[in-house]
Amino acid sequence: MSERSAVPDLAALHAQGAAQQPTYPDQGAVDHAVERLRSFPPLVFAGECDELTEKLAAVTRGEAFLLQGGDCAETFDGVTADNIRNKLRVLLQMAVVLTYAASVPVVKLGRFAGQYAKPRSSDFETRDGITLPAYRGDAVNGYDFTPESRIPDPQRLVDVYHSSASTLNLVRAFTTGGYADLRQVHAWNTDFVMGSAVGSRYEAVANEIDRALTFMKAIGADPDEFHRVQMHSSHEALVLEYEHAMTRIDSRTELPYDVSAHFLWIGERTRQLDGAHVELLSKIRNPIGVKLGPTTSADDAIALAGKLNPDNIPGRLTFVTRMGAGKIRDLLPGLVEKVEAAGVRVAWVSDPMHGNTWEASSGYKTRSFDDVIAEVQGFFDVHRALGTWPGGVHIELTGDDVTECVGGGEELSESDLAGRYESVCDPRLNRVQSLELAFLVAEMLRKA
């Protein structure tokens, strides 16, 4: 059987059981959108995916740390130069802090250029006695609460492609065109963050980096790594039509890759061992991840590893744990211990966001910065006690001065949420909170 025929067709995947999929009213329109997507050039290249696998293999071995971050749900309106630059800037700042303060290579993985679809706990939403399909992200339908907006539209999948291409083009321009040059460390810290306590702390790190760069230049060392960074893309593989249409056969190896992103992950709601998402991602050669929530048993995780990474290739599989601050110390040890004892080669990464969401009295979904830090600290403590490597963090964040998560150095309260709450789905850390988290994680890494 060829690798091409090894990838199930869409009908077979849907027949197998596909959770969290939109219900399109016009199958002909779906087929047309899928055919258009199949004709488009790849957004990423298979060789780039292989490079990321090698980097994640270093994370698996305990030789590097993964920083993955970006929007909860991207929007088409958010594809602007300012928005993309601001997200990239906070990731660069966080990576600099982690690399310099913890002296460990940091693999940089953006949660962007494809994160347009979201799983939902209910297929429908009711407001004032009116029930409509739930908003599933711009990849599926519109945010406005109207019957017209909430109809799933497959043309949006084509729009996802073009928006992702625009985002990747700009990210590549920034990361190779001088913006990511280490000599820009001070420029990344201008505007509102400059006057904050965490901004001042960042400036101290930037000054030390400046002195180190001056010394390196004086002795004639000026490696290319000082002037550009590798930023890879990732998103949750959710809408099967999009991911299947973007799966292509690599001309070098004749193996299938999902060329919509370098890294794809399977969510907590779609990780059924016999489900369509696990089946599809088991066939592609990208590095992949799986979100593991509090109901995940060690046997579940081992079975998923057997299906998704049967050859046990380091860097191929990442387990992203999202237990909640109050459960992480109880649930994670048994999971890690049994998976490690089974000889599974996997990178362990903490998602401290999704297990810590709650609704404020004002009705806004929010997260406490203290809970986020508590889950990361629990994650590190468990791995330290077991002698395993806490391989990274997966954060929902924005480069803007939003007010969506309470706490942090700015001491945002529930009453502040209405000030600038811009997320269309889940609350994100703002730039100051993200940078503050980076310093705290760097301290944990030094002790790991």
Image (cartoon, grey):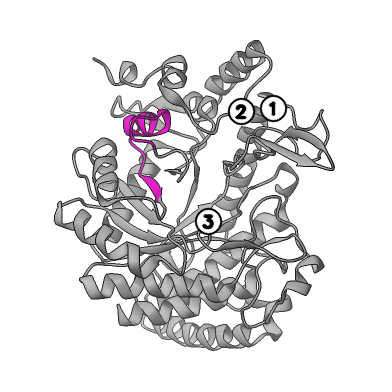
Residue type beneath disc 2: Pro
* Extreme residue in the front direction: 129
Badge 1: how crowded within 10 Å, few (<14), some, or many (20+)? Answer: many
Earlier along the polypeptide chain: callout 3 or callout 2?
2
Marks 1/2: CA–CA distance: 6 Å
Residue type beneath disc 3: Thr
Residue type beneath disc 1: Pro
> In the shown orientation, is residue 14 left or right of residue 50?
right
Residue sitting at 52 percent across and 57 percent down? 354
Q: Quadrant of the N terminus?
A: top left
Q: Nearer the viewer, residue 446 or 137?
A: 137
Q: How many marks?
A: 3
Can you see residue 60?
yes
Q: Tell me, yes or no, whether the two marked residues, 1 and 2, touch with CB atoms within 8 Å.
A: yes
Measured as percent of width and height from the top left, residue 272 is found at 38, 36
What numbered label is drawn on residue 152? 1
Residue sitting at 53 percent across and 56 percent down? 176
The residue tagged 3 is 176
Task: Check residue 285 for magenta coloring.
Answer: yes
What span is colored magenta in the figure?
272-291
Q: In which quarter of the image is the C terminus?
A: bottom left
The residue tagged 2 is 22
